[in-house]
Image (cartoon, helix red, strand yellow):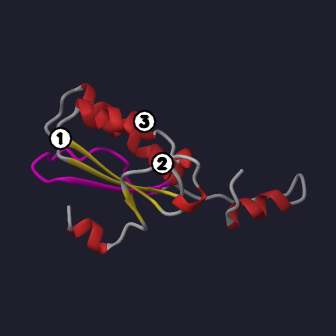
Amino acid sequence: MRDTAFKRVLKTMPLESEVYIEGPYGSVILNYDYTKPTVFIAGGIGITPFMSMIRYATKENLPHKIFLFYSNRRPEDSAYLEELKQEEKENHNFRLIATMTQMENSKLSWHGKTGYINEEMIKNM
């Protein structure tokens, strides 16, 4: 379990504590209008809702131009990273822009982008 504020609270909560959870809200579907590019921004396990849309677009050979900005601390923390690289190879309409924010703590090498997703990174795509 990684050290995040949310997980620290969960870890220290007494057993049988009651919690109130809301959401998710909004639509999490691939836009029907394929003439406009689709841009996803995800961090960590937040990639999960986008995976089915990316898989579906690849499997069905959809014309949607999809850009995924995906940030993680280290490659070893990155859910679905290898699958996303494979999706990018199979789907010429899908572009993965992955970035790592804490490579100094990684045991793996990384030749991609580093730092946080920001306006400059998005504009340069």
The residue singled out by tag 1 in the image is 93
Q: Residue at x 38, y 51 (%)?
A: 111
Q: Residue 82 got which mark?
A: 3
Q: Amino acid at mark 1?
A: Asn
Q: Residue at x 69, y 67 (%)?
A: 5
Position of 59 with respect to 27 (left or right) is: left
Q: Can residue 35 be found in the magenta stretch?
A: yes
The residue singled out by tag 2 in the image is 109
Q: Amino acid at mark 2?
A: Ser
Q: Earlier in the sequence, mark 3 or mark 1?
A: 3
Select label 3 or label 2 by which is in front: 2
Secondary element type, mark 1: loop
Residue 32 occupies quadrant: top left
Secondary element type, mark 2: loop
Residue 17 occupies quadrant: bottom right
Residue 86 occupies quadrant: top left
Above or below for 77 versus 53: below
Q: Amino acid at mark 3?
A: Glu
Secondary element type, mark 3: helix
Query: Dividing the image into 4 quarters, which one contains the C terminus?
Result: bottom left
Residue 66: image location, x then y, percent: 23, 47
Residue 54: image location, x then y, percent: 32, 38
Which is more toward the observer, 37 or 26? Answer: 37
Which is more toward the observer, 85 or 43? Answer: 85
Q: Residue at x 52, y 53 (%)?
A: 44
Q: Which region shows up in magenta?
A: 25-43
